[in-house]
Image (tube, rainbow, N blue to C red):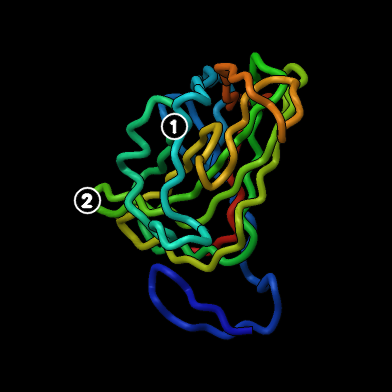
Amino acid sequence: MRLFVMGVKQWRDFDQWPPAGYPQQRWHLRSGGALERDVSPASPPSTLTYDPNDPTPSVGGPKLDGNGPGPKDNRSLEKRADVLTFTSPVLESDLEVVGQVTAQVWLRADRPSNDLFVRLCDVDERGKSINVCDDLVTVRPDGTTEATVELSPTAYVFRRGHRLRVQVSAGAFPRFARNLGGDEPVATATTAHVTHLEILHDGAHPSAILLPAKA
């Protein structure tokens, strides 16, 4: 198969999918907005509040309309209080990611239903944050719950001097319909509930993004 590798703008040929030679790397979410290879045994939860009356907007990504699809600057989105960001140190060498990207996130919520949106971004030397891949799942929390989000497969080179960034939020509207946070059927729900979320990332709850990658 032939893939267009973003970040270096090259076509490359592979003899299988997913291609061999891309071992899985775990990059762990940490308190204070860090993204590190090692898990921290003690890392207080990160918190966010989602209000369906002021839903977290969708920016770029795979959209079927002509209103701003594809890679976009995410900096204005990342300034919102309902978006958490976790950013790696500056990369000392190119990091090539080819294959399925997955996130494993431990969370607690105070409503019977919430959405979890996870996005991987490439942050350049100027701080511009460009979306690479993402997806959303609906979670029905039962105490502390682990949610798995399969972000879309990708072929991307994060260049030396750039940083990885993971966004975590509870929606991306209007690309995904709002989760109103209640027990009503999704198709007919009308009552909106504010949802408070805790994202856990300690030794017992090692929230992370999993990258098929090689340096």
Amino acid type, residue under disc 1 in the picture: Val
Structural distance between the alpha carbons of marks 1 and 2: 20 Å
Instruction: Indicate the position of residue 7 as horizontal and vertical percent values.
Output: 39, 68
Q: Residue furthest top?
A: 110
In the rendered image, which residue does mark 1 sit on? 83
Q: Secondary structure at mark 1?
A: strand
Seen from the viewer's position, the closer of residues 162 and 166 is 166
> Which mark is nearer the camera, 1 or 2?
1
User: Could one spot residue 206 in this view of the protein?
Assistant: no
Query: Would you say 51 lies left or right of 205 here?
Result: left
Mark 1 vs 2: CB contact within 8 A: no
Q: Quadrant of the N terminus?
A: bottom right
Residue 39 position (above or below residue 88): above
User: Could one spot residue 36 in this view of the protein?
Assistant: yes
**Residue 13 image-quadrant placement:** bottom right
Residue 103 position (above or below residue 215): above
Q: Tell me what residue is drawn at x 62 percent, y 25 percent.
A: 180
Seen from the viewer's position, the closer of residues 6 and 159 is 6
Query: Would you say 118 lies left or right of 24 here?
Result: left
In the rendered image, which residue does mark 2 sit on? 126
Amino acid type, residue under disc 2 in the picture: Arg
Q: Tell me what residue is drawn at x 50 percent, y 40 percent.
A: 173
Instruction: Indicate the position of residue 138 as horizontal and vertical percent values.
Output: 69, 36
Q: Secondary structure at mark 2?
A: loop
Seen from the viewer's position, the closer of residues 184 and 48 is 184
Instruction: Indicate the position of residue 101 as horizontal and vertical percent values.
Output: 61, 55
Residue 25 position (above or below residue 22): above
Residue 80 position (above or below residue 49): below
Q: Say few, some or many: other residues with alpha carbon within 10 Å of mark 1 (under 14 / 14 to 19 / 20 or more).
A: many
Q: Tell me what residue is drawn at x 57 percent, y 20 percent.
A: 198
**Residue 185 image-quadrant placement:** top right
